[in-house]
Amino acid sequence: MLNAKNLNAKFNLKMIEYRYMNEATNSIIRTRFAPSPTGFLHIGSLRTALYAFLLAKHESGDFLLRIEDTDKKREVEGAEDALKEILTKFGLIWDEFYKQSERLEKYLKAAQKLVEEGHAFYCQCKPKNAKVEGFSNVLRDPCRDKSLKSGAVKLRVPENQTLSYFDFVHKKEISWKSDTVYDATLLKSDGYPTYHLAVAVDDLDMKITHILRGHDWLPSTPIHLLVFEYLGGKAPKIGHLTDILSSETGKKLSKRRDSVFVEQFVNDGYLEEALLNFVLLLGWAPKDNKELFTLDEMVKVFDINGFQEANPRFFMDKLNWMNGQYIRNLPMEDLNSKFQMTNAKFKALDNKKQLEITKLLQERMVKLTDLNTLAKFFWEKPDVDISLFGENYKKHLEVANEVVNNIDEWKLEVLNEKLMERIKSEGFKVGDFFMSLRIAITGMKFTPPINDSIIILGKEETIERLTSVITRSKTTK
Ligand code: GLU
């Protein structure tokens, strides 16, 4: 069972070492990750959560998890628990937890205050006029001067103002003319807030010092700036993260074309530590060229100035390389238990054999799921396709069978030596001989080192597999 509380306690202890206050505001850094519970976690959201976590933890601040669940139509059952579980797995442990659906009263009060103070108005237009939540086709809403007493609440956007903020990711001032900003809906007629109202109320209420979010939210920012101001608060610092581009198409990662969900990567055999390290470098860079970081190391080195302005590309080769590095750095027992968790047939082998296979694979695998492709032949007799063999294979296999039969001391060095002796005396080409042997034993052309594999497989099983192919070869041409 995952236990966020224990982990939290353990983790925060480490944080104490480098706790200091944010000098500029003399307040502790508080960041939040604010997902909507709409399904799997996007790799870009993992990055947002990581950066928000690091920004806070580098200065021993607070990282909040806030579930933005006011759009009940989009909510997916179980998504909240899944989110908590996956963040915990990645070590991104939150200090405080909030859920917007439990805070509806706050939004209602804020909306009423805005109406009372003339910064918002009631609107009774049919919702179909509103294109997307909070946006409408017309900039200025026809109800804004009607002084209605009920309905949805919309923002009264002022004329001729410049709305601006300094984006700490892009390191530049971004501004809008208020004449281009919609009278956005803040509270729907059913009493539920839109994202615009809820986000601003919460960021003020929760004393968020730094907002970090996806680039998609940039057009909402002028609305939020107004709401922050009208609610009498100071806007937190805001940073919009770059878009992650596919290395193949150069376009923004797409759910249809690319793998984008964290759960999918984990199922495909990528380690949490490797994924986290990989997303760290998608849009942020350390001062030196260091590439591999544990979460603790990330916390230590994370620096707000390290955000990169150019959109990063998602290079699968790089993720594969990184995952391989993490696999090789795992203690062998840990890798072995990960294998056990992902593969029941592997788990059914005796322990000694399991460890031997783990040792053999650790040096050469990219992701955990390679276990099944690279090592399946250990627990499943191969279905050998005779057409894979090259010339002379029958002779190769007969000789191999003879050598194996005559070995008393079942050891790698002995097998190596005896096979090499015969290869030489028979005048075989070394590569061709081992390819025949590899195919007969595993059914594949790419495998872990074949002699090591044969030793693990055992004498009896090896003889059985060789004999089976030799027998078949006699009945085929
Ligand atoms: N609920 C929004 C999301 O799903 C949060 C955006 C923000 O952080 O302001 O990404």
Image (cartoon, helix red, strand yellow):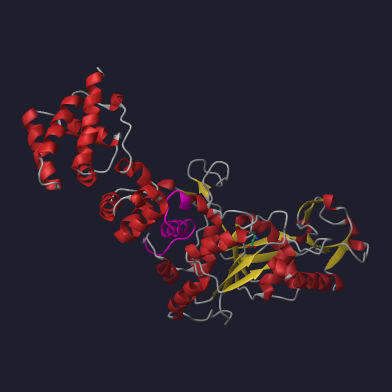
* Residue 11 against residue 331 in the figure, above or below: below
User: What is the residue that sits farthest to the top in this orientation?
Assistant: 477
Image quarter of residue 444: top left
* Residue 355 against residue 65 in the figure, above or below: above
Seen at 53% across and 62% down, the residue is 85
Q: Residue 276 colored magenta? A: yes
Q: Quadrant of the C terminus?
A: top left
* Residue 122 against residue 41 in the figure, above or below: below
Give residue 175's position: percent from left, percent from top. 68, 61
* Left/right of residue 122 with respect to residue 238 in the rendered view: right
Give residue 342's position: percent from left, percent from top. 41, 52
* Left/right of residue 207 with respect to residue 267 in the rendered view: right
Stretch in magenta: 266-289
User: Between 411 and 368, which is closer to the camera in this rendering?
Assistant: 411
Give residue 18's position: percent from left, percent from top. 44, 79
* Left/right of residue 394 with respect to residue 142 in the rendered view: left
Give residue 396's position: percent from left, percent from top. 16, 29
Seen at 88% across and 62% down, the residue is 151
Whether residue 364 is visible, yes or no, is yes
Whether residue 223 is visible, yes or no, is no
Quadrant of the picture in which ligand 1 is shown: bottom right
